[in-house]
Image (tube, rainbow, N blue to C red):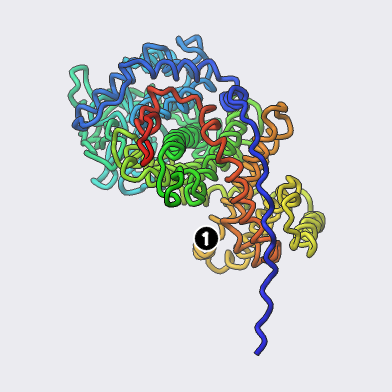
Amino acid sequence: MTQPALPRRPAPSPVRPSPLVDVAALKALLDGPEVGVRDFVRQRLTDPRFAYVYGLSHHAYREVVLGWLRELAKDGLGALAVAPQYGGAGRPRDFLASFETLAFHDLSLTIKYGVQFGLFQGSVILLGTEWHHRTFLPSISSGELLGAFAMSELGSGSNVRDLETTATYDAATETFVIHTPHGGAHKEWLGNVACHGAMATVFAQLIVGGMRHGVHAFLVPIRDASGAAAPGVRIGDTGIKEGLNGVDNGRLWFDQVRIPRLHLLDRFGHVAADGTYSSPIESPARRFFTMIGTLVGGRITIGLSALSAAKSALTIAIRYGNRRTQFGPEGGNVTKLLDYRTHQRRLLPALASSLVLDMALSRLVDRFAALQDGGGHEGESREVEGLAAGLKAYTAWLAQQAVTDARECCGGQGYLQVNRLAVLRGDIDVWTTFEGDNTVLMQLLAKGLLTGYKQEFAEMGVIRLLTRRARAALKAMNPVTARRDDEDHLRDPVQQADLLRYREERLLDAAARRLRAGMKKDPLGAMQDVQDHLMHLATAHVERVAFDAVQEEVERAQTSLRPLLMLVRDTFWASAVERDIGWFLMNGVVETPKAKAIRYLVNNCIQEMRPIAEQITQAFAIPDQVLAAPIAFDALPTRHG
């Protein structure tokens, strides 16, 4: 019996020369206009007072981190986002940059800094009004008033809209009564609560005159001047965790705790002395999502800090791989770890992705800042919220995998705390959970894309939209294009963009069709049936947005940077397509020879990147005292020396 012919195997293209790395220009690109505050934080962290200390009890560790936080507050970093009339600098973008740069250091400090000056202070800035700003911001930004952000509850988890803590208004005394109705409604996983916090922004169901007005935020004292729990407040210690043990996470219960009427953060909902409720937003649902939407900055900072952790881990592992040798021909030279393809495969696509996602997050910060300044519209706000959710999830997963691979690529040395990778792995794990579970956030992004799809139908009309999509499909599924496997074609940014955009649009069309078919019978069941599809769609969207960001930088980059950015772009694109090659094959977008050529392109790209990988990491400008892993610096012994 005649065997069917195997698909033609494309001949691998020769590896191209490595581009030059203009380290200063790449650093300038990554640092952006916030270079001043970034360099200040880098330099500040080289102070011996910020040296890592290992082997402490978690109680002692918490006090070390508190001391670090107070040092940063003395430097004025806590006031970066505060308006000048309240003693601040009025530079919220500098605050985001400071948070991102701090994440090169101990992540417990990063999170405690974020809880105090991002979540707690940010809630007062974004949800409060002038009285709150004048009364509380000076002491919060100086670190005198330490606080917490009390949203999550044990019972409701990610379902913030249905949390159960209540805030009932008593007009006779002009107070709100904060109450935990049962044990499962206590506030959980609250940074700054177990030891140090004196106040918390508490999210609770507002009840006025027996009527519920939805979730609102309240400033609730949780400790008195002596440090004891305030009357009616019970404080618990979360205890030792997988990581971040320098953060004093705790729990809160409230038993009929009274607070002044003015402690309602009332930007979106006000209660007058007589109990009259008013809001600039009539719809309770829209009011809730507007309030939650103002906190999108937290998700952006988590994405930024995840990338910093990934950059630290990759820098350590790449430096070690450039020094450590293992095996080699009998009597010949030993081989450096980074010369092994398996090593390159684990580290270098992640290095490229960290650069690409840096650019994507930078554009997201631009859009977020414009919204904060009063620009944009409701649709833009929803897009920013959705993309912040997706990029947070994607970067957290990238960082988690990059740190794990870096740890394993350093063998037993990577397991030592002093080499930081083991500690980073324990710390970074929770990035996939806080500020929103990654899986939930990706579905949030996908649902937003479906909402936009529905509006696009309404605005463009069915015929025009379907015609546009059909043209894109014909272009993407062209038989000649599907078979082309030469490297010049694969590195063509127009072809690359077309492939990613077609995947996203095809997944969006299919998700909409599947939902329409099931929503009439069982809306909840229909959503559950397409959850895997929505995850795929969200991933495709994030990767397309990230690709667009790096391509934009390629087009406007100075000459010395363009070849490097092209290599970074090609590595990111080829790796993303290779991970999802089954979809492209099943949908006829690529044929088998082209799929193989894409795999070869990944290998060629990482071989080009290998000689310059350590130079690329130099552009992160992580100070030696902050990187601080002996394996990243020491000359390692070999069998020949």
Res. 270 in view: yes
Split into 4 quadrants, where in the image is the N terminus? bottom right
Disc 1 residue type? Asp
User: Is disc 1 surrounded by few (<14), some (14 to 19) or many (20+) residues within 10 Å?
Assistant: few
Placement of 606 over or under 467, stated as above or below:
above
Give the camera-side residue of 125 and 9. 9
Q: Residue 203: which quarter of the image?
A: top left
* Nearer the observer, 293 or 33: 33
Lateral position of residue 177 relative to residue 273, left or right: left
Residue 157, position in %: x, y?
36, 47
Q: Which of 572 and 197 is in front in this view?
A: 572
Residue located farthest toward the bottom when viewing the structure as drawn: 1
Residue at 75% from the left image edge and 58% from the top image edge:
476
Image coordinates for residue 97, horizontal then vertical, percent: 50, 24
The residue singled out by tag 1 in the image is 532
Q: What element carries label 1?
A: helix
| Residue appearing at x 67%, y 87% in the figure | 2
Quadrant occupied by the C terminus: top left
| Residue sitting at x 66%, y 31% | 376
Q: Which residue lies furthest to the front in this view?
A: 331
- Residue 452 placement, left or right of 94: right
